[in-house]
């Protein structure tokens, strides 16, 4: 009887400690989120903090899946490309001119809109989005126990405006392969393709959003940088990837195989993409807001 009382008291202490830790996380995260809202540049860290808090404070599952005491406090960013400048902001109708790299200099006014300017801005928007959402190392979105859903969050909306003539901007994959992230020892490509919770690596999965492994941007279209939690069955993904006719696919993509143990489970991927409106509609079953 004494042993049972001791064990009960011990379990009670453990529960109290767990509750204290969770409470501390909630309080600290709430303070950071509130402070982040008070600054123009605090939005990114506010978003990331809320994502970390939401993932860290999952409580007991309910009929609709695991719940968290936190909502994701993220705000969509808007990017607009003009002939002679680039604007960015949290409000579509109130964007500000930003500095871009042009011929080795940081400038706010450019002679013309080039592939290099477009690619650098979109690559950075993808980096920010992936950073905000935990770099694929967190189970960010609530899981449903009834069906599989692809849940996405649109981090950025990208538009072209008042260009002299329609234009297609190319070379994006080459840019992210060659360009190192500021203050990091990895390229954008390596950053997006780093080890994570995803079953399928980014460099393999991204082929569903490209044409022959290339990405280009048509100035007549809008584009969206999105983070997505793909929750498809293995068989569905294999059908798209290996039974559909694909040409020019690198060997490391076609050689990618899944073990039978993995194939019995759901396919969980946590990736960042840049897509057009049609691709967004096709890939995203539920859009988190």
Image: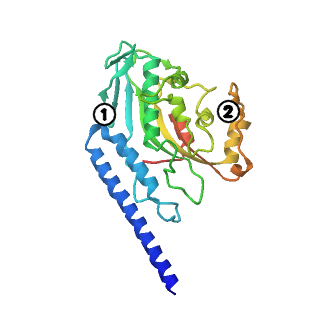
Tell how many labels. 2
For the question of whether residue 271 can be seen, the reply is yes
**Element carrying mark 2:** helix
Residue at (71% x, 29% y) in the render: 251
Q: Nearer the viewer, residue 104 or 87?
A: 104
Q: What is the x, y in percent for residue 203? A: 60, 33
Q: State whether residue 110 is above or below residue 136.
A: above
From the viewer's perspective, tell me whether residue 283 is left or right of residue 252: left
The residue pinned by badge 1 equals: 93
Q: What is the x, y in percent for residue 72? A: 40, 50
Q: Are marks 1 and 2 in contact (CB under 8 Å)?
A: no
Residue farthest left in this picture: 38
From the viewer's perspective, tell me whether residue 36 is left or right of residue 81: left
Q: Nearer the viewer, residue 21 or 43?
A: 21
Q: Residues within 10 Å of mark 1 (few under 14, many from 20)?
A: few
Q: What is the x, y in percent for residue 249? A: 68, 27
> Which of the two labelled residues, at mark 1 and mark 2, occupies the earlier sequence position?
1
Residue at (50% x, 55% y) in the render: 142
The residue pinned by badge 2 equals: 253
Q: Quadrant of residue 77?
A: top left
């Amino acid at each position: 009887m004494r042993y049972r009382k001791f064990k009960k008291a011990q379990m009670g202490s453990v529960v109290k400690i767990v509750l204290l830790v969770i409470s501390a996380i909630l309080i600290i995260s709430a303070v950071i989120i509130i402070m982040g809202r008070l600054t123009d540049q605090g939005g990114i860290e506010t978003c990331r903090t809320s994502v970390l808090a939401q993932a860290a404070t999952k409580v007991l599952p309910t009929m609709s899946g695991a719940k968290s005491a936190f909502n994701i406090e993220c705000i969509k960013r808007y990017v607009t490309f003009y002939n002679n400048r680039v604007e960015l902001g949290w409000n579509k109708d109130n964007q500000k001119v930003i500095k871009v790299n042009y011929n080795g200099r940081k400038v706010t006014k450019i002679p013309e809109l080039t592939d290099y300017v477009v690619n650098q801005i979109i690559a950075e928007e993808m980096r920010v989005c992936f950073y905000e959402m935990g770099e694929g190392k967190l189970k960010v979105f609530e899981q449903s126990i009834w069906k599989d859903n692809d849940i996405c969050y649109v981090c950025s909306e990208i538009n072209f405006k008042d260009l002299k003539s329609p234009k297609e901007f190319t070379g994006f994959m080459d840019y992210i392969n060659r360009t190192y992230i500021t203050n990091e020892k990895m390229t954008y490509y390596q950053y997006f393709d780093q080890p994570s919770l995803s079953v399928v690596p980014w460099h393999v999965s991204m082929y569903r959003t490209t044409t022959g492994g290339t990405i280009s941007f048509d100035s007549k279209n809008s584009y969206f940088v999105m983070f997505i939690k793909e929750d498809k069955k293995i068989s569905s993904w294999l059908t798209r990837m290996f039974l559909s006719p694909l040409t020019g696919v690198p060997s490391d993509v076609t050689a990618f195989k899944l073990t039978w143990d993995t194939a019995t489970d759901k396919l969980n991927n946590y990736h960042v993409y840049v897509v057009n409106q049609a691709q967004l509609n096709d890939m995203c079953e539920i859009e988190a807001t």
